[in-house]
Image (tube, rainbow, N blue to C red):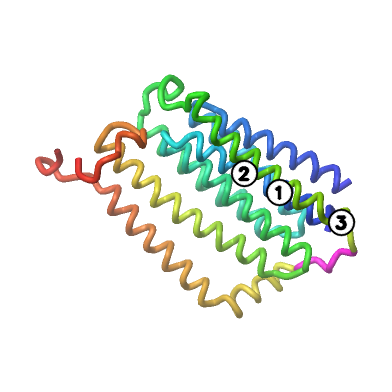
């Protein structure tokens, strides 16, 4: 049952990502990407990581994608479906490189022994995850908080309106 | 562990290379480049969570959460820079920003 759900969700994620990167309009691309992120969140939940699944929905789909939508709608890009979209000649090297990379990945995986399910290790409780996070990676948590603060200050500085008469 | 680790790696590799191909194809549009970077980072998170489920170790989930924090700060800075550049040249075309002083 869970295997079937995993494969369905994997197909949904891949198809939504293909539609997202092939879409000319950025808002439509973001909405396709939100679909992909929701299916990825359920995959994370199936892989016994409910905390990451919740953060994926709350932070990725809820905050980052909405930030993208705000910026795209604020910028007033005119008619983005007419300009800026890649010509078919620009897709060729990208498709070639992706095909070579995917083929090499497939070759590596096929050359290994056949995949087989194995006995599951016991699932991780959130208590265990939180203990590891705050006891052994406390310094990383502090660094992440500093990094978020720096990003906040930098975004405030970059988004500041220029003074009148000073701007070109 | 519901599916073998190889299948998770295949899914993550497909998503990563899709993001990479999109990044190469959309190299004229700043916003779509950022979207494709999101796809690639999401695939990396899937690898971390899959490894965490395979070996029963919590560190993979922690690194997925760290990647999420890194992504949020990166996206906020990059979008602020997109707004700044759009205010200067009224476009998000990367070919326009080909000079250091303008």
Specify whether residue B94 is painted magenta: no
Dot 2 and dot 1 residues touching (CB under 8 Å): yes
The image shows residue A163 at horizontal and vertical percentages of 15, 45
Residue under circle 1?
A: A105
Give the Cα separation between the discs numbered 2 and 3. Answer: 24 Å
Specify whether residue A123 is painted magenta: yes
The image shows residue B52 at horizontal and vertical percentages of 72, 64
Which residue is painted at 63% across and 33% down in the image? A18
Give the Cα separation between the discs numbered 2 and 1. Answer: 10 Å
Q: Is residue A69 visible?
A: no
Q: Is residue B43 left or right of residue A124?
A: left
Q: State the image quarter where residue B44 is shown.
A: bottom right
Using the rendered image, report if marks 3 and 1 lie on a common chain.
yes
The image shows residue A58 at horizontal and vertical percentages of 58, 50
The image shows residue A62 at horizontal and vertical percentages of 55, 46
Output the chain of dot 3: A
Residue under circle 2?
A: B17
């Amino acid at each position: 049952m869970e295997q079937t759900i995993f494969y369905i969700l994997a197909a949904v994620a891949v198809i939504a990502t293909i539609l997202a990167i092939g879409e000319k309009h950025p808002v439509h691309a973001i909405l396709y990407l939100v679909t992909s992120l929701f299916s990825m969140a359920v995959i994370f939940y199936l892989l016994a990581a409910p905390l990451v699944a919740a953060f994926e929905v709350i932070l990725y789909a809820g905050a980052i994608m909405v930030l993208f939508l705000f910026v795209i709608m604020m910028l007033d890009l005119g008619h983005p479906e007419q300009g800026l979209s890649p010509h078919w000649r620009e897709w060729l090297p990208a498709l070639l490189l992706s095909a070579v990379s995917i083929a090499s990945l497939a070759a590596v995986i096929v050359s290994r022994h056949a995949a087989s399910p194995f006995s599951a290790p016991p699932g991780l409780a959130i208590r265990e995850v939180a203990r590891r996070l705050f006891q052994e990676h406390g310094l990383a948590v502090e660094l992440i908080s500093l990094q978020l603060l720096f990003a906040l200050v930098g975004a405030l500085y970059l988004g500041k309106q220029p003074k009148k008469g000073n701007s070109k | 562990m519901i599916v073998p680790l190889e299948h998770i790696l295949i899914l993550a590799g497909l998503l990563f290379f899709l993001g990479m191909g999109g990044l190469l194809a959309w190299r004229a549009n700043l916003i779509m480049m950022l979207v494709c970077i999101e796809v690639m980072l999401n695939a990396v998170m899937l690898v971390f969570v899959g490894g965490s489920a395979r070996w029963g170790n919590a560190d993979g989930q922690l690194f997925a959460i760290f990647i999420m924090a890194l992504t949020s700060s990166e996206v906020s800075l990059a979008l602020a820079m997109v707004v700044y550049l759009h205010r200067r040249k009224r476009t998000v075309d990367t070919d326009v920003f080909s000079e250091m002083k303008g």
